[in-house]
Image (cartoon, helix red, strand yellow):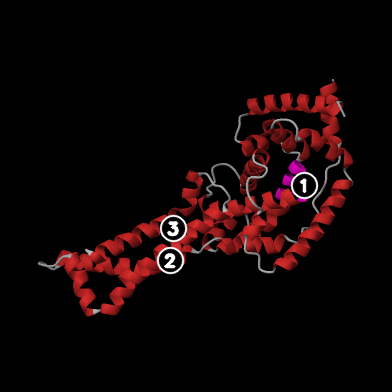
Amino acid sequence: MNEAELLKNIRKKPEIFSELFKLYYRPIFGYILRRTGSFDDTADIAAETFLNAFQHIQNFKYTGISVKVWLYRIATNEVNLYFRHKQKHNSIFDRLNIEDWNIFKNYMDEDRNDIETELQKHNQFVAVLKELKAIPVKYQEVIALRYFEGKSNKEIVEILNINEGTLKSLLSRGLEKLRIKCNQI
Amino acid sequence: MEKENFEKKLEKMTKPEMPQLKHEDMLADAIINAKDQSVVSWWWLSVPLFIIMMLLMKSFYMPGTSLISNIHELAVKEKYMSLIFFFISPIVLIIVNILSIRRIYYLSGNPKSVNFLETVWFNVLIILLSVLILIIYFL
C-alpha cells in the first residue's frame, strides 16, 4: 500500500492510523532521541507528535511533501517547544487512556534500559549532543537533521520549510559554533 | 580546513540506533482511542435536521402553513418523538461536544488557537446546529 492509499484508508477508517504509526514511529523516535538524548523526554515528545498527527491527519493534503516529511516537521516543532518550555506541561502518558498501565510501564522500563545501553555505546555522540544542546535551537535542528539523520539539503529544506540559502547559512554558522564548543572539551 | 575536518568527524561518528520498541503497539492503541468519533453525533443530529427540512418543504408547498406551525403541529401529534429529537438529542449533543472539545484541548497540551480550531471545527459545528434546532423548536 502506498502513502496516498494509506491516507485515503485512514480517512475512511481512523484505526488504520496504526499502520502509519508502525511505519514511522521508530524513525521519528530515533530522530527525537538524537535531539534530546533522554528516553523519557523522547517518549513524551514522540507520543505528542503522533497524537498531533492523528488529530490533523484528516486535514493533511499532498502539497508536495510526504507524510514522513510532515511527521518530521511536527516532531521538530515539538522538540523546539520542549527546548523552549522544558517544564511546560505534565507528561502525555498521564493524560492518555492506556488500557493496561502496568504492562505499558513494564514495556517502557525495558525500552528505557535498551536505549540507555545503546546510548552508552556512543560516548562521542553523547558528548557532541551535550554541546549541540547549548547552541541556539535554529542551529541544532539543521545540524541534527544533516549530520545525525543524514538528510539531504532538499529534505531539510522541506522539513523546516526554509529556503536553501538560509539552510546553508544556518549550517555554516551552526557548525562553527558547535566546533568551537567541542574544541573546548 | 578545521571546519571540514569537524564536518567529516560528525559524519563518521557512530550514532545510537533504535532497537525494537516494546511500548509501540500499546501507545498506538491509546492514541487512536484518544480521538472522539464525531461521526456518531453527526448521525444523531441528521435526524432532527432531516425532519426540519421536511417540515420546511411542507410549509413551502402547503399554503397557510409555516415551519413554526408545522413544528408545533408535530409537537402535539408526536409529543415524545419531537421531545427526543428536538430537545433531548440537541441538549445531549451540546454537552457531549463541549466535553469533547475540553478533552481534545487537554490532550493537545497547549495548542495555538488556530490549530485548535482546525481540530475541533466539527464539534463546534454540531454545537451550533444543535442550538439552531433548539431555537427553532422553542420559537
Closer-to-camera residue (B94/B65): B94
Q: Which residue is mark 3?
A: B123
Pick whichever of labels 3 and 2 is earlier in the sequence: 2
Res A140 visible:
yes
Type of residue at label 1?
Ser
Secondary structure under badge 1?
A: loop
Q: Is residue B64 above or below residue A128?
A: below
Q: Position of residue B125 (x, y in %)?
A: 39, 56
Letter of the chain that mark 1 sits on in the rendering: A
| Mark 2 surroundings within 10 Å by alpha-carbon count, few (fewer than 14), some (14 through 19), many (20 or more) | some
Q: Is residue A8 above or below residue B63?
A: above
Q: Position of residue A86 (x, y in %)?
A: 68, 42
Q: Are marks 1 and 2 in contact (CB under 8 Å)?
A: no
> Do marks 1 and 2 share a subunit?
no
Q: Are marks 1 and 3 in contact (CB under 8 Å)?
A: no
Extreme top residue here?
A: B1
Q: State the quadrant of the N terminus of chain A.
A: bottom right
> In the visual, does B30 lie left or right of B13?
left
Q: Which residue is mark 2?
A: B41
Secondary structure under badge 2?
A: helix
Q: Which residues are magenta?
A: A27-39
Q: Which residue is mark 1?
A: A38
Between disc 1 and disc 3, the foreground one is: 1
Q: Position of residue A101 (x, y in %)?
A: 70, 66
> Do marks 1 and 3 share a subunit?
no
